[in-house]
Amino acid sequence: MTERRMARRYDLSLPVSVRLPINREPGAHDGQTRDISTRGVYFIMEKDLAPGTEVDFTLTLPAEITRGTEVFVRAHGRVVRVDKQKDDQRESIGVAAVIERYDIIRGEASPN
């Protein structure tokens, strides 16, 4: 299979908070990233989403990764693929989303 990615992927397991835009559903759904790039993200969550769904999500890059302060990434994207995964106890949903825009917000310096 030919690699279609245009940006380098980083295997990062970070907490992610996912919201459906325009108040389609109240509250956020928690998940965990599996990998991320400047153009896309793959995360695992329990909420089933359909391809084409718009999503807003926020994740935090810890100070250990940024070599300074923690950095918050707020992004808007669109689901391009959904993988349903089932283990013995529950079903989880793998979501691949293209990032259409994002903002980076630096946190306060952490004490040394």
Image (tube, rainbow, N blue to C red):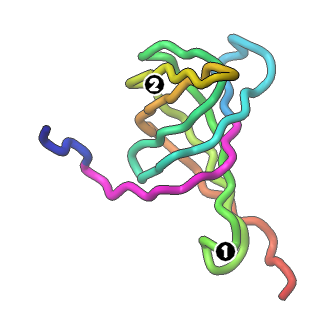
Q: What residue is shown at x 48% (from left), y 13% (from top)?
A: 50
Amino acid type assigned to the residue bearing label 2 in the image: Val
- The magenta region covers 6-17
Q: What residue is shown at x 39% (from left), y 24% (from top)?
A: 81
Q: Position of residue 43 (x, y in %)?
A: 54, 37
Q: Position of residue 17 (x, y in %)?
A: 70, 37
Q: Is residue 50 above or below residue 69?
A: above
Instruction: Report the predominant secondary structure element of the magenta stretch.
Output: loop
Q: CA distance from mark 1 to mark 2?
A: 29 Å
Q: What residue is shown at x 43% (from left), y 16% (from top)?
A: 51
Q: Position of residue 75 (x, y in %)?
A: 57, 41
Task: State yes or no: residue 15 in magenta.
Answer: yes
Instruction: Kindly identify which residue carries mark 1.
Output: 64
Residue 21 or residue 88, whichever sits in front: 88
Nearest to N terminus: mark 1 or mark 2: 1
Q: Secondary structure at mark 1?
A: helix
Instruction: Kindly identify which residue carries mark 2.
Output: 79
In contact (CB < 8 Å): disc 1 and disc 2: no
Q: Is residue 105 above or below residue 97?
A: below
Residue 97 or residue 48, whichever sits in front: 48
Q: Quadrant of the C terminus?
A: bottom right
Q: Residue furthest bottom?
A: 112
Q: What residue is shown at x 70% (from left), y 72% (from top)?
A: 63
Residue 108 or residue 81, whichever sits in front: 81
Amino acid type assigned to the residue bearing label 1 in the image: Glu
Task: Say which quarter of the image contains residue 100.
Answer: top left
Task: State yes or no: residue 28 in magenta.
Answer: no
Which label was assigned to residue 23?
Answer: none
Q: Residues within 10 Å of mark 1 (few under 14, many from 20)?
A: few
